[in-house]
Image (cartoon, helix red, strand yellow):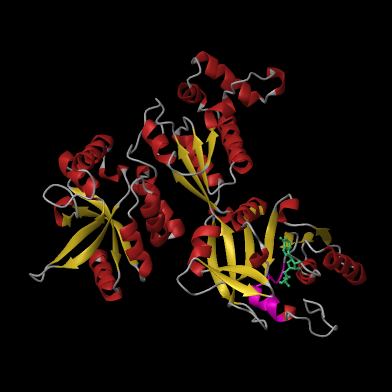
Amino acid sequence: MTYQTFPGEGPGHSDSISKLKALGFPGRMDGLSYLDIGCNEGFFCFEAKKRGAAVSVGVDTYAPYIDNARERGQRYNLDVDFRVGDIFDVEGQFDYILVASVLHYIKEPILFFRKVFSLLNPNGTLLLEVGVTDNDRDLTRVFRDDTDYVYPSLKFLAKNWLRDFDVNLFGESVPQVGDPVNRKVFHCHKIQSVYLAPPSASALSAISQVEGQRIDADQYFLPAVPRSLARVPEQQKEIFKAGDKFDGDVVLAFKSIAHDRSIVNYVVDVLNEAVRFQGGSKHTFVEGRIVPFISEQLSARLKPSEGFRVFRMATCDAEGSIQIGQTGAIDVQNTADVRADIEKFGAQAWAERYLLQNRTPNRALFERITKQKAYWLGPIDVPVADLIPMSGPGRKYHEDQAEWDRRADQIAKAVNSPDDIPPSIAFVRDEEDGSRKLVLADGAHRHEAFSRRGFKTMPVLLWFDNEALYMSYQARIAA
Ligand SMILES: C[S@@+](CC[C@H](N)C(=O)[O-])C[C@H]1O[C@@H](n2cnc3c(N)ncnc32)[C@H](O)[C@@H]1O
């Protein structure tokens, strides 16, 4: 009996036709590329081809399956590229990658998913069907057919093996006789965060704590090794000339050519290509004296629909000095950038990312906002005096007091206006006297810095775990 079930051939072990639906296999794949890891006799590769895929590649380590698959391909007159091998034998980029009922055979899942990440187009989809446990253990060993198989818990799968992906549970898969754990289907997309950062000491020290790919933007324009000028584009020649004129000072060089649209387009093209060429890890840092007009245009090029999430960290002004916040990685986003992110990804997504990727991650609040449904309002400007911080002078310190004070001082020096840094996060608390106060769950240093600077208001994102309260504040703010 075959493993897969082919129409008109009687049942195989797996009900492949029902599995098509359970996988959420796309109705059409016109012109797209499809890769099937552990393709067996090719059932899904043929389906991809029938749905219009321009390229359909199937790999399986077991040669007799591939022989049968090729023979079927000829019989059905469907052009599928079948290969004996595993994922590490494949190169290229694919719009869809299917990994169905295969993961329990994979001995090095971390390397496996890194490879999947590199093979998936930025806007591609990984269709993953896998047995997951619902117990508290990260991994569970199951002895079956004289072999040990290891199954992950849902949480472990998402947070560890699939950490580079945005993971969406699509649904239950088709159960099969002898399944030791339930199979589920996930649709996963690549997340590639791109941080545009000038080489400020604070930005660099913050990003050095995050694993990722670094792109030296300056070197793309003023390379260390001279090239033949005859072979470089006109715009690059202009950049060289400007670089020479300003003794290699990239900011002044760019400032002097900023009026030339063709040069700006060229710079943005080169950086856009660099990200697509050299990026490829979850976090990509483009470092260099990226002046704001380049940063803006580059952000527009790296589209969310392609899986890019761009964070413009502190940008240089035309004179090369850092314009906004010097306090750490994402906390150098300003309120306007945060508003734009919230519009694109939603407040929940922004808050989750901010709380974890901040230089001093606020895991406690992250746990709270992800455990139950959270409702968000804002950012809105709230009087500094109306906010209750949870640490700082007269309160508890969650870190060394001198360090706490130093950070507050650093922020106070770095901000020029309340909107220079990201909003704080606050929630509503009912006091014993019947009044209601806004409590800062994140942003005590900022609050202290604002008080020291004499700012009257501060931008705050409000979160609620209670729909009624959220509605009443929404009405209040609207009024
Ligand atoms: C249970 S079958 C699933 C087949 C198919 N994906 C489906 O869902 O109908 C597992 C397949 O994975 C193949 N396989 C096992 N380890 C593999 C590996 N490391 N790389 C590629 N294929 C593998 C097996 O030969 C077998 O054909």
Q: Does any portion of residue 162 appear in the rendered image?
A: no
- 459 and 178: which one is in front? 178
- The residue located at (39%, 53%) in the rendering is 356
Quadrant location, the N terminus: bottom right
User: Which residue ends up furthest to the left in the rendered image?
Assistant: 433
Q: Residue 121's x, y, as percent?
A: 65, 53
Q: How many marks?
A: 0
Residue 473 image-quadrant placement: bottom left
- 153 and 168: which one is in front? 153
- The residue located at (75%, 81%) in the rendering is 13
243 on left or right of 372: right
| Residue 471 among those drawn in magenta | no
Q: Residue 381's x, y, as percent?
A: 24, 53
Q: Does any portion of residue 63 appear in the rendered image?
A: yes
390 on left or right of 64: left
In the image, which residues are magenta?
A: 18-28
- 178 and 20: which one is in front? 178
Q: Residue 375's x, y, as percent?
A: 34, 68
170 on left or right of 91: left
Quadrant location, the C terminus: bottom left
Q: Residue 39's x, y, as percent?
A: 76, 66
User: Which residue ends up furthest to the bottom in the rendered image?
Assistant: 10
218 on left or right of 447: right
- The residue located at (84%, 64%) in the rendering is 66
Is residue 295 depicted above or below 87 in this figure? above
Residue 104 image-quadrant placement: bottom right
User: Which residue ends up furthest to the front in the rendered image?
Assistant: 146
- The residue located at (67%, 26%) in the rendering is 233
Is residue 267 depicted above or below 394 in this figure? above
Ligand 1, what quadrant? bottom right
- 249 and 165: which one is in front? 165
